[in-house]
Image (cartoon, grey):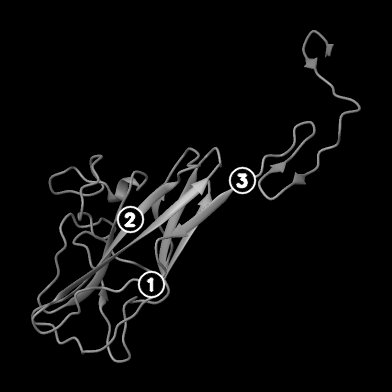
Amino acid sequence: MQTSPNYKLKETIGEIAPSFSTSTAYKISPGYRAMQETYIVLSLSTTSVTLLPIITANQNIATGTFAATVVTDNLSGFSLYVKANTSPVLQSSYDSFLDYTPVTSGVPDYNWSISPTSSEFGFTPEGVDIIQKYKDDGSSNCNSGSNDTADKCWYNFSTSNELISKSTTPTNPNGSTTIFKLRAEKGINSSLTAGTYTGVLIITAVAN
């Protein structure tokens, strides 16, 4: 140790140089002030969701669910994003569901609601790390309060990344799970063409 009236300095001389040693189960980074690596894994409960029941003349709503789990040792946690591959996302060869249209642009609807002449597709997320935008006051408003009421706060997918969940702390070893609830509805007076409708969503997790 070296000192002066203004500074104190600790030195290390002759210590093993930083490097990595690995096995099938561990990685060791020895040496003085070895750099910390960030570990992050995203897993999905499924990569293919079928919306059921099938929409027919007598059945106008179909739903589906999948889960995204993020495990990371990053001290600042993670951010989870979703975007659609196309706009609108749910399409057939001849027609498409419109992306869900909230009453107030940029703010999810507390209750799902569409025009009788429209057919739309949207989602709501649930989980302990969803951002404020998708939380509710337990009454009628989203982006308000601290509740995560089931089947509330509906929004649309877009071709731009939408932040869904965010943690500011590590989530290992159990991970943080966000549930995506999907919903497609054919308005009772909609002229939507019969067919098979598909769409692609892109889920991304990054270390903060």
Q: Quadrant of the N terminus?
A: top right
Residue 26: quarter of image:
top right
Left or right, 23 with reference to 181: right
- Dot 2 corresponds to which residue? 179
Q: Nearer the viewer, mark 1 or mark 3?
A: 1
Instruction: Give percent across and percent down for residue 165.
Output: 39, 50
The residue under the point 84% across, 22% down is: 11
Q: 10 Å neighbourhood of mark 2: few (<14), some, or many (≥20)?
A: some
> Dot 1: what SS?
loop
- Dot 1 corresponds to which residue? 48
Mark with earlier residue (1, 3): 3
Nearest the viewer among 195 and 113 is 195
Q: Which mark is residue 13?
A: none
Amino acid type assigned to the residue bearing label 1 in the image: Ser
Examine the rendered structure and indicate whether residue 119 appears above or below residue 204: below
Left or right, 81 with reference to 89: right
The residue under the point 77% across, 12% down is: 6
- Dot 3 corresponds to which residue? 38
Is disc 3 in contact with disc 2, using a CB cutoff of under 8 Å? no
Examine the rendered structure and indicate whether residue 13 appears above or below residue 70: above
Instruction: Give percent across and percent down for residue 4.
Output: 82, 10
Instruction: Give percent across and percent down for residue 188.
Output: 8, 79
Mark with earlier residue (3, 2): 3
Q: How far is disc 2 from disc 1 in space, using C-alphas? A: 14 Å
Which residue occupies the extreme bottom position in the image?
Answer: 94
